[in-house]
Image (cartoon, rainbow, N blue to C red):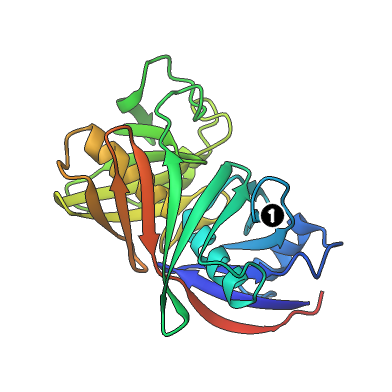
């Protein structure tokens, strides 16, 4: 099976042309190829297939084999992959995801993809949409007890559920431990949640560290960046509508309007191509 491996902000993915390999069992294949010891190694896997409502459809699976509705860094890698491989031969196109249709705009330099902009749609602050079992109008700075300590969490849906915790610095926060515990707090988040720890530097710069649902600690998360920027703005932590999100693996640029419609922009890079023996 031929594959490409790409990364965006340190988030790495295996890309497979689903138009060529139509009979794959995607969940088990994702677990195999994403394994960092017995497979290729990645945070997730994506395949493409025909769409009746968009130019192409994206199927996304986490490294544990679970299906994800959407992936921000992933869709940038996906967009580069399908353009580079001639699957979609346009600089502006639409992608069907389990979280709706996303609209892509490629910036080319010398005929190669330099940046990918994605219209991510509107952030949903409603608890029932996340879903979250906190009976409030919005889940903003809600106090919850985690491992005997009280944390303030804010949660939204950005295609997938995201929870954000603001920190003054990262000392005293075991992100892997706390992230995993919060992810599996199904009493609060019935479908689990991604967890982001953010430090606001100024109106235009936020540092973010992410624990991803179904993948664990990753170097970056596009939907997490979008969610964190929206929550920081909603809480008055930033005043502008453009912010650079500094992940552990790179930078993601987020622009939001007054209704919290999100435009995400960043790069993607092909690491390697090869053949995997299933």
* Residue hosting label 1: 65
Label 1 sits on a secondary structure element that is loop
Q: Is residue 147 above or below residue 40?
A: above
Provide residue 153's location: percent of width, then percent of height: 33, 33
Q: Residues within 10 Å of mark 1 (few under 14, many from 20)?
A: many
Q: Is residue 177 left or right of residue 270?
A: left
Q: Quadrant of the C terminus?
A: bottom right
Of residues 90 and 263, the one nearer the viewer is 90
- Place residue 178 in its image quadrant: top left
- At which x and y percent is residue 184? 53, 38
Position in image of residue 260 (x %, y %): 33, 36
Residue in the image at 34% along x and 32% along y: 154
At a point 34% along the width and 52% down the height, the residue shown is: 174
Q: Residue at x 17, y 45 (%)?
A: 240
Whether residue 150 is visible, yes or no, is no
What is the number of callouts on the image? Answer: 1
For this rendering, which residue is in front, 101 or 27? 101
**Furthest residue in direction right, as rendered:** 23
Residue 147 in sight: yes
On the rendered structure, is 28 left or right of 110? right
Residue 179 placement (x, y as % from top left)? 43, 46
| Residue 73 placement, left or right of 152 | right
Q: Give the position of the N terminus as an image quadrant.
A: bottom right
**Looking at the image, is 146 positioned above or below residue 128?**
below
The residue under the point 27% across, 34% down is 258
């Amino acid at each position: 099976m031929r594959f490409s491996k790409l990364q965006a902000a340190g988030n790495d993915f295996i890309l497979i042309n689903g138009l060529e390999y139509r009979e794959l069992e995607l969940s088990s294949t994702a677990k195999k190829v994403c394994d960092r010891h017995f497979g290729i190694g990645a945070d997730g896997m994506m395949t493409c297939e025909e769409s009746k409502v968009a130019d192409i459809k994206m199927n996304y699976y986490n490294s544990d084999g679970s299906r994800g509705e959407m992936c921000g860094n992933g869709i940038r890698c996906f967009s580069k992959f399908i353009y580079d491989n001639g699957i979609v031969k346009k600089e502006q196109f639409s992608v069907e995801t389990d979280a709706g249709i996303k609209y892509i705009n490629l910036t080319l330099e010398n005929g190669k993809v330099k940046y990918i902009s994605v219209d991510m749609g509107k952030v949903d602050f409603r608890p029932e949409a996340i879903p979250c079992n906190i009976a409030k109008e919005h889940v903003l700075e809600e106090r919850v007890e985690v491992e005997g300590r009280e944390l303030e969490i804010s949660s939204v849906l950005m295609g997938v559920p995201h929870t954000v915790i603001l920190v003054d610095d990262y000392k005293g926060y075991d992100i892997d431990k706390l992230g995993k515990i919060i992810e599996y707090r199904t009493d609060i988040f019935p479908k689990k949640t991604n967890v982001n720890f953010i430090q606001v530097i100024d109106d235009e710069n936020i540092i973010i560290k992410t624990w991803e649902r179904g993948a664990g600690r990753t170097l970056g998360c596009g939907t997490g960046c979008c969610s964190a920027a929206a929550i920081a703005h909603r809480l008055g932590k930033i005043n502008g509508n453009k912010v650079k999100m500094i992940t552990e693996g790179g930078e993601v640029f987020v622009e939001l309007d007054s209704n919290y419609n999100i435009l995400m922009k960043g790069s993607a890079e092909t690491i390697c191509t090869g053949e995997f023996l299933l």
